[in-house]
Image: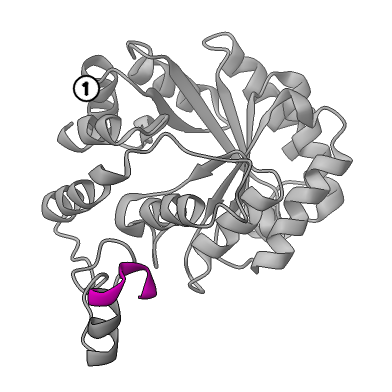
Amino acid sequence: LEIARQLVTLGVDVIEAGFPISSPGDFKAVKLIASCVKGAVICGLARAIPKDIDAAYNATKSAKTGCRIHVFLATSKIHMQYKLKKAEDEILRLAIEAIRYAKKYTSDIEFSPEDASRTEPEFLFKVVEAVIAAGATTVNIPDTVGYAYPQQYGNLIKSIKERVTNIDKAVISVHCHNDLGLAVANSLAAVESGARQVECTINGIGERAGNASLEEIVMSVKTRRDIFSDVATDIHTRELYKTSRLVSKLTSFVVAPNKAIVGLNAFRHESGIHQDGVLKERITY
């Protein structure tokens, strides 16, 4: 609850507060945040299963700034064959049915084709088009295992914009993992290519090697206006360090001293040449 309130102060648009069906504790946490926190849309995660969607809605329905249901379903051959043991036609049917089911609760519905970066592009386009037609207002393209490379991932977002005929009816979102250290680079490549929501975390915390770091994405967009001239965020950047320290303290997740933006050494200079330059003119280093 303390972190959620600080995220609102920071200026985030949507807080994906948890996966309500996963445990009674998660359900209670999401419900508490929805009940008490005003200023951001509160989102609950759900598999493409009615009971999951019910739980996500029941946990978020009291949200004062609006609730969102985020439905995910794997679409890569690897996941379909080994995890779900389902064929493409069945995956497509389940995705459409899940969105239609969620639509009875809220008009703010996000859909993620899990492992999108390893999904056959033609099938991915088909799924994205179908879920938008069924009522999804945000389509999220996850790099679930941190497999993508920036140029490739950026081109995938471009292809979705070009090949999905109803893409103008939804916001393209991205969700990148950092297994190869490319989560932020992939997210920024996606923004350059037209993505307008980035799923990210404070200090880059998350599964395995973590997720894309919010503070790195925000400061990249703010610093490189020559590249990101047509996009901006409402993040209050003076709150980044405070938020980072709060999350670190409450999760016992230690921030590396050389971590970009919020690490203790990020703005320290050891070299005498650097110190001399900074004293003469800050923009030198």
Q: Residue farthest to the front? A: 280
Residue 185 vs residue 253, the one in the foreground:
185
Q: Quadrant of the C terminus?
A: bottom left
User: Mark 1 packing: few (<14 Cα in 10 Å), some, or many (20+)?
Assistant: some
* Horizontal arrangement in the rendering, residue 182 relative to residue 3 (left or right): right
Instruction: Determine whether the residue tagged by mark 1 lies in a helix, strand or loop.
Output: helix
- Location of residue 89 in the rendering, given as x and y in whole percent from the top left corner: 82, 38
**Residue that label 1 marks:** 32
Give the total of numbered labels: 1
* Horizontal arrangement in the rendering, residue 205 relative to residue 100 (left or right): left
Residue 88 in sight in this render = no
Q: Residue at x 73, y 65 (%)?
A: 152
- Location of residue 85 in the rendering, given as x and y in whole percent from the top left corner: 68, 51
Q: Quadrant of residue 267?
A: bottom left
Q: Residue at x 77, y 37 (%)?
A: 127
Q: Amino acid at mark 1?
A: Leu
- Location of residue 257 in the rendering, given as x and y in whole percent from the top left corner: 21, 74
Residue 93 vs residue 220, the one in the foreground:
220
Q: Residue at x 42, y 24 (%)?
A: 56
Please provide the residue range marked out in magenta: 279-285
